[in-house]
Every structure is written in C-alpha cells, then in structure tokens.
Amino acid sequence: MDVGRPGAEAGDRELVSAVLDGGDERAFRTLYRRYTPQLHRIALRLTEDREGVAEDVVHDTWVRAVERLSTFGWRSSLGTWLTGVLINRVREQWRAWGRVEWAPLERIAEPAVRAVAHEARVDLDRAITALPPGYRAAVVLHDVEGYSHEETARLLNIDVGTSKSQLSRARRRLREWLEPKEATP
C-alpha cells in the first residue's frame, strides 16, 4: 500500500536513486512530504496520542530509513518499508515505557477505558488509544491505514492468524466500548 497513489513506486525509485547517488535534498524532501503524514498518523495512534513522542518516532524513522536506504530491496513499496521502520521504533518506545508488546491474547488486561462512564461519549480515537498495543497496532494498520492482513502480519512480525485474531478481538472491544448501553430504570 502506497498512500493510495498508483504508480508511486516508480516515482519513488527515481527519488531514492537521486538521494542515494547524489544526496539530492529536493528528492528527499519530496519523499518526506509524501510519507510523513501517513507515518505521523500511525505513530500518533500507536503512541497513545502523545504528539511529542509521535514526532520523535517519525524523526527517528527518517533518520534510520536514510541510514538503511541503500539496503532497501524493493520487495515491498517504500511506504510499507517506512511503516515497518516506524513500527520497530514504536516497539522500542513501548519497551521504554514498560509496555507489553504482543502478549498472549488471554493475558492482556482490560485497559482503563472500561472505567469511563457509559454516559460519557468515548470517541473512536480515544478508544483505539486505550487498546493494548498489539490490538491497537492491528486496528491502526489494517482498518485505519488499509494494509492487508498479510502486510499487517509482516509489519508486526507475527503470523497472519495472530494478526486476524488480534484485529477481531480489538474490533469486539471497540464495539463494546462504543455501543450505547441501555439505561436501567
């Protein structure tokens, strides 16, 4: 998936070559403008809406991507590869926070959003933010960003079945949290 633009990969190859061959700053800025909005959206959702952390993660993603750009083999689109670099950086952030990454599904504790009164409106972004990291990553990559199950699994370095299971359970939790509860007399 490449930000919804057919043929972006061909243009990306030329831009990457220009960056690698001559350090073309304009080519880099074009790539940066093309992919940063998507990377920032994903980072923001995966870092619990912490703007400063998301910005740092995106910055680190670009630094690491440029360092490794010469090793990129075009087995996926540039956007998918950049998203993989971003997810690895987010995982490092989760570990720094002491968060469990991909815990077995039965051991994931209920997040704090359960305690929110049902009268209070819990919007989707807030509910996604409250999901455990593995569930959140599956929802963001598949449902929000449009990656396939196979791409999501590859990006998260998990089995396709695990990706599907986490997505299904995440959707169930989101429905439970977002469905209005009937008032009891």
Image (cartoon, rainbow, N blue to C red):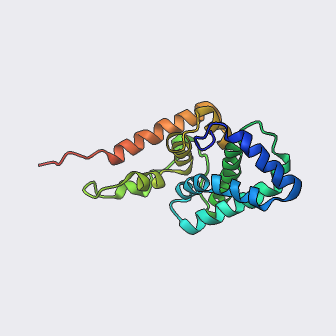
Q: Is residue 41 above or below residue 107?
A: below
- State the residue in front, 135 or 86: 86
Q: Quadrant of residue 63?
A: bottom right
Who's the residue at 79% across and 49% down the image? 16
Q: Quadrant of residue 25?
A: bottom right
Q: Is residue 157 among the parts visible in the rendering?
A: no
Who's the residue at 67% across and 43% down the image? 80
Q: Residue furthest top?
A: 161
- State the residue in front, 161 or 23: 23
Q: Is residue 184 left or right of residue 88?
A: left
Who's the residue at 77% across and 58% down the image? 64
Q: Residue furthest right?
A: 21
Q: Quadrant of residue 77?
A: top right
- State the residue in front, 62 or 180: 62
Q: Is residue 167 among the parts visible in the rendering?
A: yes
Residue 88 image point, x, y percent? 69, 52
Q: Is residue 41 left or right of residue 60?
A: left
Q: How many marks?
A: 0
Q: Is residue 183 left or right of residue 155?
A: left
Q: Is residue 143 above or below residue 87?
A: above
Residue 54 image point, x, y percent? 59, 62
Who's the residue at 35% across and 48% down the image? 177
Q: Residue furthest left?
A: 185
Residue 48 image point, x, y percent? 51, 59
Q: Is residue 1 above or below residue 110?
A: above
Which quadrant of the figure contains the N terminus? top right
Q: Is residue 26 left or right of residue 163?
A: right
